[in-house]
Image: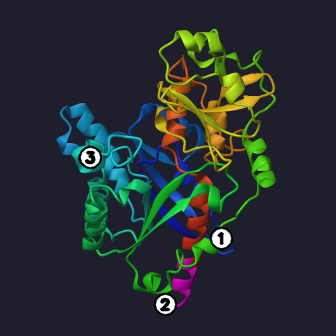
Amino acid sequence: MVEYKVGSLFAGVGGICLGFKNAKTKNSRYKLLWANEIDEYACETYRTNFSHQLLEGDIKLVLHPEQATEKTEQKYYQKLHDKILSEPIDILNGGFPCQAFSIAGERKGFEDDRGNLFLNIIDLIEQLGEKFHKPRILFLENVKNLQAHDDKKTYTHIKQKLENCGYKVYEKVLNTMDYTDVPQNRERIYIIGLLNENDIKNFEIFKDIENRIKNKDKASRIKDIKKVIDYNLTKENATKYYYTKEKYPNYFMSDEEFEKSNKKEKINLNTQIDEMYEFYQCRRGMYIRKNQSGVCPTLTANMGTGGHNVPLIKVNDGIRKLTPKETFKLQGFPVDNGYKLPTVIKGRVYPDSQLYKQAGNAVSVPVIQMLATDLLELLEKSDMSE
């Protein structure tokens, strides 16, 4: 069994890593060497599910430990620096922070520090190149809007940086609901960079990929939804997820209450969220909208921080929002079947808000696994022809 070594930047809770871990052929698979993540809550979730080394900390300081302000911090980051450069890797992947480019965010791009984090990818490529060799393949993921941001200047800049490192760059926007059984409308750009001439010659992953679109009917979607939504939960055992008039009086307005209010549109979840196996949103607290595609709308990081547009569903005994476990399943994480959500961090109860944030920031695991498997087949084909 041939193993291709993988390093992961901006690893989050390990969606890309899990997709690569699950990808295999008869003759080859991936070996995850290390991952980097800065968020302590995401790190706790990551460590709960992976055994390889997690380099917890600021990637800028991992790459340049001398820039740390204190000696103890310099020593800590020097160890991480030594690890990230301890051996060559074949694949470097990363879902670099997308909020700077997202329609759901403020779209500041490289004016936002999170946008500038992309440059650390270039920095690591060059450092690996100086010590060993550059990664043979780059695998990056981001929001669809990255391509259009700032009149396409942002993506042109990113692509040019990768090409200056010697990579042939390919990109494709794929929607999770089209290519997997996961019922979520999630369009993301997948960027693949190739260094090896044989890999470039044999690359056809994005060619005719539309032929893989599943085109599911409503009955198939309902089956998929039942796999991720727990309809056995009730107000008795999951009270905190339910929307009631006591907690949200403005979301259950009677005709009389509406006439007395200054609202432009009446909201009553009991009457407006009226179909099982559908997903709704209370848009900006102003009106109710059912997702027209018959799947969950794109999950966002602000689900757990009081953000608007939290997906709502009708269940047997009322209206509720998704649970953290359901949001992870809507990203294709096999929760309770090999993947665990942490319940405690540093002696405290692990907050739901952080799990919602992690699910919204995560990638769709089955899409990653599909593409990672394609890359394994590409690597095998190229290596056989050498």
Secondary structure beneath dot 1 equals helix
- Seen in the picture, residue 5 relative to 183 is either above or below; the reply is below
- N-terminal of the two: label 2 or label 3? 3
Identify the residue at image location x=54%, y=36%: 45
Vertical placement of residue 253 versus 370, above or below? above
Left or right, 197 with reference to 75: right
Q: Is residue 111 placed above or below 88 in the rendered structure?
A: above
Residue found 56% across the figure and 66% down from its top: 371
- The residue tagged 2 is 386
Q: Which residue is mark 3?
A: 60
Whether the magenta-drawn stretch holds residue 303 is answered as no
Query: Residue 179, position in %: x, y?
Result: 64, 62
Of the two numbered discs 2 and 3 in the rendering, the one whose residue sits closer to the viewer: 3
User: Residue 342's spot in the image, x, y percent?
Assistant: 60, 30
Q: Give the class, few, some or many, for how many residues have Cα within 10 Å of label 1's Cα (few <14, many ≥20).
A: few
Q: Amino acid at mark 3?
A: Lys
Q: Which residue does the image show at 52% across and 57% down from the upper left?
A: 32
Per the rendered image, the range of residues in magenta is 378-386
* Amino acid carrying mark 2 in the image: Glu
Gap in Å between the C-alphas at discs 1 and 2? 30 Å
Q: Amino acid at mark 1?
A: Arg
For marks 1 and 2, give the one nearer the viewer.
1
